Amino acid sequence: MAKEKSGTKKQGDAKPSALELSQRRDHAHVPLEQRIGAVIKRHRLAANLTLSDLSVGAGLSSAMLSRIENGMATASLDSLERLCAAVGIGLSDLFRETDMTQGSAQLVKRSEQMEVVRVGTKYGHTYRLLSYDRGPRKLFEPFFIEMDKKSESYPRFSHPGAEFIYMLQGRMEYRFGDHTYLIEPGDAFTFSGNVVHGPEKLLDDRIKFIAIIMYGE
């Protein structure tokens, strides 16, 4: 499958769902001190340490540690480093997990899914983009694809990264370089995207499958 797009049947950028917007607002309202405290408390409990145990190990009073865990006090970097060492994690782990608490979710309703016309696709092809990557770098592209025997041609693609196909309906012969593979409902096919690939022959009137392009670093 190719990376290029020649046009879309729905115009405009995808809009965040109400749930995603709500989550973003919620995370934006959580102070950094609370997020740091939550991570430290989670690791303290996982290590079966009491407040007293950790306060001794980190050289802090139990009262101060309680305030840090509850987001009521800002710890110095030196204190955070001692706390991290006492619970067995690095300072970088602490901040990474703090960021992880601000993850997001994306629900794309069927009516919001963008139908994409790709290079090499003509009559009888439908590519529906299932997720819209809003990050600074595209990590993956998932598609729901329908094809039928009325298709004028079967396109060939190549792209960076890897591709995963899961067959939902119908059977097809799929070309990957010099080889062809029979893909049937329930089959999963993973391959390198840089090798030329694409449907070779449809064995049923209509096929449906999920294709996910995973881009490398």
Image (cartoon, rainbow, N blue to C red):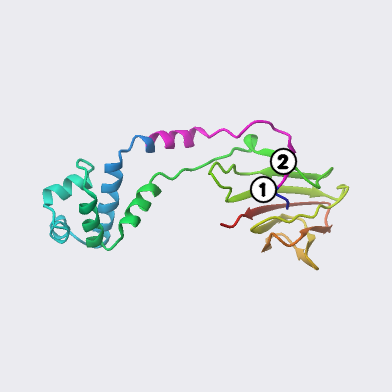
In the rendered image, residue 22 lying in the magenta stretch gets the answer yes
Work out how far the residue at label 2 is from the one at label 1, CA to CA, in angstroms: 9 Å
In the rendered image, residue 206 lying in the magenta stretch gets the answer no
* Amino acid type shown at disc 1: Phe
For residue 137, above or below residue 27: below
* Amino acid type shown at disc 2: Val
The residue identified by callout 1 is: 143
**Could you tell which of marks 2 and 1 lies nearer the N-terminus?**
2
Task: Magenta stretch: give its range.
Answer: 4-26
| Front in this rendered view, residue 154 or 168 | 154
Q: Residue 89: image x %, image y %?
A: 30, 61
Q: Do the residues labelled 2 and 1 touch (CB within 8 Å)?
A: yes
107 sits left or right of 69 in the view: right
Residue 116: numbered disc: 2
Q: Residue 209: image x %, image y %?
A: 71, 53
* Residue at 66 percent of width and 43 percent of height: 129
